[in-house]
Amino acid sequence: MKNLLKSIVENSKEYTKEGKVASYIPELSKANRDALGICVVTLDGKEYFAGDFEEKFTVQSISKVVSLMLAILENGKKNVFSKVGMEPTGDSFNSIMSLEVKNPQKPFNPMINAGAIVTTSLITGDSSEEKIENILSFTRKITDNKEIGINEEVYMSEKLTGNRNRALAYFMKSNGHIDGDVEEILDVYFKQCAMEINCRDIARIGAVLANDGVLPWSGERVISRETSRIVKTIMVTCGMYDASGEFAVHIGIPAKSGVGGGIMASVPRRMGIGVYGPSLDSKGNSIGGIKILQELSEELDLSIF
Ligand code: GLN
């Protein structure tokens, strides 16, 4: 396995040149475009690594999976999906159009920014500090990593420039999609996106989902089997935004990307995979990360279809 991962990372390196690191959050533009790494966590607890697997990066949209798991755990699926839908959009992750034109009832799904801001608004806590602490402690639990914290520079960078998310959130407030103070909800959202992790952390999240909601390293159940199934299904249909269909055809694994360069993937009953490569394609997905997952899926026959 180790040699396989090493050769796949080598083969995928050339593709990083074809993409760009995210710059709309200014701090993210400092990432090393050529970095590429992978970690695989199997359900019997074995962990395999290759490439720049130790590099830290911000979780960004992969946090939408974590907040969805937690929101369902705390509120129940009925409440959560009365406020956010389950349908793919075919639009970019920060599109504002569908909120008014296509589906004014609720945001399409929890993997686009609008839907994720709604999910975050449902996390329990008496203050925004308590809410982010709640998300952080759940993240530490499902990664078995107590060290996870927030990258303050990336958080501040998005807080200062995140006007598209502000527009989405105020629009949803005006429509009654979100309750509470918009700036406080956004503050929690920007912080959850700025949680700093590495390939191993996200591979472990993938492994928990692959293991139907049970931590493979301790046997503790953190979410129900049903929630785990719902989350993986939404990852298949919406996790790679408007590239989800193509990703399902070529790779066929539930996955979630983030503009920090990470992709978290979960192969049911087999393994969790974390890849990192901050060079992104035009849809905001890691270009080298997708190549790695494609080759790994072909080599190990990982497609669920
Ligand atoms: N924090 C980012 C944003 O809201 C996350 C987007 C992403 O990773 N696709 O724009």
Image (spheres, helix red, strand yellow):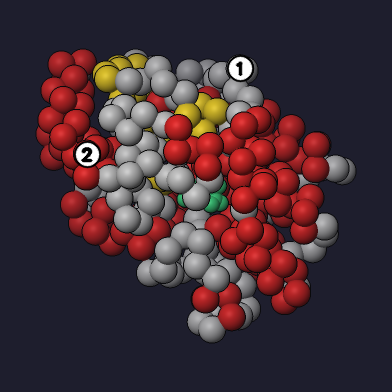
**Residue at the location (20% across, 27% down)?**
9
Task: Give the residue drawn at x 82%, y 57%.
Answer: 181
Q: In the rendered image of this protein, does residue 243 appear above or below residue 143? A: below
- As rendered, which of 71 and 106 lies closer to the eye? 106
Which amino acid does the dot numbered 1 rest on? Glu
Query: Element at badge 2?
Result: helix
Residue 67: x %, y % from top left: 61, 45
Question: Is residue 246 at least partly visible in the picture?
Answer: yes
**In screen coordinates, is 170 left or right of 218?**
right
* Residue 127 coordinates in the image, percent (x, y): 85, 43
Q: Is residue 216 visible?
A: no
The residue that mark 2 highlights is 17
Q: Amino acid at mark 2?
A: Lys
Q: Residue furthest bottom?
A: 101
Report the front residue among 22 and 78. Answer: 22
Task: Tell me: 15 left or right of 137.
Answer: left
Does residue 116 appear to the left or right of 86 in the view shown? right
Q: Position of residue 173 (x, y in %)?
A: 75, 69
Secondary-structure class at tag 1: loop
Q: Which residue is mark 1?
A: 147
Number of numbered labels in the structure image? 2
From the image, which quarter does the N terminus lie in? top left
Callout in the foreground (2, 1): 2
Q: Position of residue 195 (x, y in %)?
A: 59, 32
- Taking the image as shown, residue 275 lies to the left or right of residue 9, namely right
Which of the marked residues, 2 or 1, is nearer the chain's N terminus? 2
Report the residue at 18% width, 20% height from top: 6
Viewer-proximal residue among 86 and 222: 86
